[in-house]
Amino acid sequence: MTASKTPIVLIHGLWMTPTSWDTWAERFRALGHDVIVPGWPGIDDRDVADIRRNPEALKGVGLKQIADHYEAIIRALPEKPIIMGHSFGGVITQMLADRGLGVAYVGVTPGQTAGITTLPPSTARTGFPILRNPFNRNGASPISKSHFHFTFGNDLTRAESDAIWEEYAVNSYNRVFFEGVAGAFNERGGVTHVEYGRPERAPLLIIAGEIDHVVPPAIAKAIVAKYTKSGGPAVVDYKEFAGRTHRIVSQDGWEEVADYALNWALANAAK
């Protein structure tokens, strides 16, 4: 009797829906894995056009609520999965790792958790359209095509980037941005607090893209350093891919990144 393959949970990031993972999900399913790709609360299985027309359900939703949403889904699975998250989904992945919910974790160009204050200028620019208006903390702001080009499509022409915006981009969860920034400067009390030295945490891989404007390698390296300097024994690894942007999960050549992430997770999964 053939043993079943480890299930995989994929967590999308801000301004995206589960469809942003279609590339990896299809590849992993073809290899025999059960792949679960839930949407954030308010997105669920809605399509892009519907969310843009009515983003009301995204308003006021914060990171703890999102992490709790994924925890409930994961605890209902028959076994612990590999958990992979992109961007803010990588923050949620680290929060779930702190709760001991997976056998291995992969943060793909992940945002920083509490206490990591590294903030390159390009990262500050990506959040400015939301953070400049604190009165809209609980809003659900759209991302403009020009800002999407800087944030996700900086390897593309504007026309190419606009076409991807049409297919994938949805409104922001503004509260998530504010909580992420606040947490960076409040390690113990921030919503994104994790115990970096937690000894029983399953292995964690942090993936960076060389030309990512949102999570440049400086942030990814700071995340890894925070875990390793904590003195905990749990495995934390780093991998950087040349020429990759924040659209790394669907950018040309995504197969190399997906295969590396899965092979690492399978090789390092906690028994």
Image: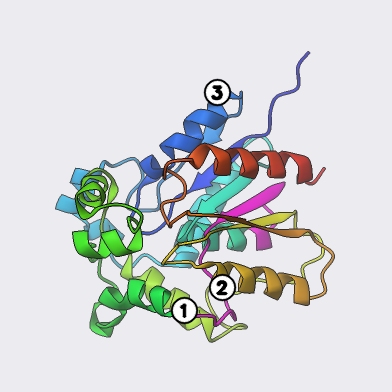
Q: Is residue 110 on the magenta stretch?
A: yes
Quadrant location of the N terminus? top right
**Amino acid type of disc 1?**
Pro
- Circle 3 sits in a helix, a strand or a loop, which is it? helix
Q: Quadrant of residue 190?
A: bottom right
Relative to residue 197, is residue 10 drawn left or right?
left
**Amino acid type of disc 2?**
Ala
Q: Are marks 2 and 1 in contact (CB under 8 Å)?
A: yes
Badge 2 or badge 1: first in the primary sequence = 1
Residue 167 placed where, x, y %? 25, 43
Residue 52 placed where, x, y %? 19, 52
Residue wearing tag 2 = 218
Question: Considering only vertical position in the picture, is 247 above or below 95?
Answer: above
Secondary structure mostly seen in magenta is: loop
Towards the viewer: 142 or 136: 142
Tell me, yes or no, if residue 195 can be seen here. Answer: no
Tell me, yes or no, if residue 159 can be seen here. Answer: yes
Residue lying at 35% horizontally and 47% vertically, measured from the top left: 17
Q: Is residue 91 on the magenta stretch?
A: no
Of all residues, the one furthest to the bottom in this rendering is 185
Q: Quadrant of residue 171?
A: bottom left
Residue 240 placed where, x, y %? 60, 57
Q: Which mark is on residue 120?
A: 1
Residue lying at 26% horizontally and 75% vertically, measured from the top left: 129
Residue lying at 68% horizontally and 28% vertically, measured from the top left: 5
**Amino acid type of disc 3?**
Ala
Select label 1 or label 3 by which is in front: 1
Q: Which mark is on residue 30?
A: 3
Q: Which residues are magenta?
A: 97-120
Query: Marks 2 and 1, how far apart in space?
Result: 8 Å
Select label 2 or label 3 by which is in front: 2
